[in-house]
Amino acid sequence: MKKYGIIAVLLTMCLLFAACGQTTNTNSAEKPKGTTAETQSSETQNTSETVIDKADSTSNYPAFDFNEKTVTLNSGYKMPILGLGMFSLSDSVAENSTYWALKAGFRLIDTAKIYGNEAAVGRGLQRAINEGIVKREDVFITTKMWTSDFSNGDEAINASLEKLGVDYIDLMILHHSQPSNDVDAYKAMERAVADGKLKSIGLSNYYEPSDFDRVVNATTIKPALLQNETHPYHQSGRMKQHISQYGTVLESWFPLGGRGNTQTLFNDSTISAIAQAHGKSSAQVIIRWHLQAGNICIPGSSNEQHIIEDYNVWDFELTDDEMAQMTALEKDERFADY
Ligand SMILES: NC(=O)c1ccc[n+]([C@@H]2O[C@H](COP(=O)([O-])OP(=O)(O)OC[C@H]3O[C@@H](n4cnc5c(N)ncnc54)[C@H](OP(=O)(O)O)[C@@H]3O)[C@@H](O)[C@H]2O)c1
């Protein structure tokens, strides 16, 4: 564990340094003009390699751009580094939360077929488009293919497109590892990339390097992203280090500990003290820690004031010492049992 803690601190420092140096400008749905995914990806990797080399010569971990609030994925597409999650939100709540999030400045929404609220997210998006708050191409939509659909991936992708009411999905990920047929599902997503239905593809809930590599070795497109339970008590250092070789970025689910567990993190004495020092809430400090550590962060909320608060994390910065204090909170302790 100690080893991964040190790696996490070094990666964090390098990512911060990289974030200061990037100035590119394109929206999330379009690849930079005149650039293929491969060349864009290698340009990005060069930038991050230059700085990450100091910590680990094998790392291609994508650098975060705090000016644009985006990261360039290994697919060549830009993705916002802070989004709103839709887990366990009813239809009406998900529609409002999506709309409030876009109004507050969020440009990334994370949903899933199994949440049952893809259509509601689509309605919230459409409301924001109708009011001129965003255009479709300003918003990055992630959804997830559920395990029972893995043998019928093509149909599942079409169903998600229809429910969301969009022509393309920015990122689709397999919701859980399922060795019996997750490779089939991943190949369906690869076909959908070729058809222009999906822009980027990735994985969720792969907690062993060998399990992640099982899919990588059987398929063509490297996962753009891995979404795993990640927070100060479970920092995912080992998987983050492993996926960096593929230029795959980590995204944190349960970033605040998850519903019912948030007070454990909010009342942690280290987190509370840092929050007090910055005049911010514990939620804002935890979100800021994720971003500075190089984790895409997708807090979930049903409350407009919380949503506004969760996006208001761009006007302060955790010091190296505070980042090290947060890194030292690692307990390898998950809140979920799946
Ligand atoms: N891939 C997977 O298997 C998986 C699993 C779980 C989650 N996810 C994704 O990750 C997202 C985040 O996870 P999550 O929503 O379960 O947990 P979370 O973001 O860690 O925590 C959500 C809880 O935080 C509260 N909260 C949010 N902002 C707050 C603030 N500023 N002050 C006080 N409380 C605040 C919410 O309450 P209010 O509603 O009152 O704001 C809610 O109770 C999900 O929505 C989903 O998109 C993926």
Image: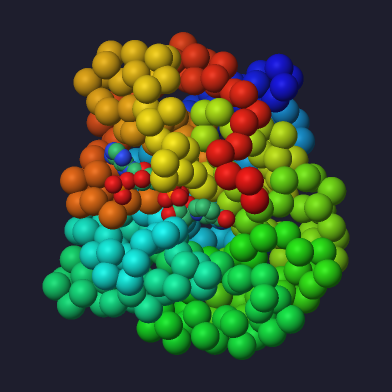
Up-down relation of residue 207 to residue 267 (above or below): below
- Direction from residue 327 to residue 119 in the image, left or right: left
The residue sitting at the left extreme is 131
Does residue 288 show up?
no
Q: Residue 167's x, y, as percent?
A: 44, 84
- Direction from residue 217 to residue 259 in the image, left or right: left
Up-down relation of residue 104 to residue 150 (above or below): above
Colouring rule applied to residues: rainbow
Does residue 112 show up?
yes
60 or 176: nearer the eye?
Answer: 176
Q: Residue 68's x, y, as percent?
A: 36, 47
Q: Residue sitting at 71 percent across and 17 percent down? A: 2
Name the image quarter holding the N terminus. Answer: top right
Q: Residue 15's x, y, as percent?
A: 53, 32
152 or 297: nearer the eye?
Answer: 152
204 or 147: nearer the eye?
Answer: 147
- Direction from residue 244 to residue 314 in the image, left or right: left
Up-down relation of residue 22 to residue 303 (above or below): above
Which image quarter: residue 85? bottom left
Q: Residue sitting at 18 percent across and 66 percent down? A: 133
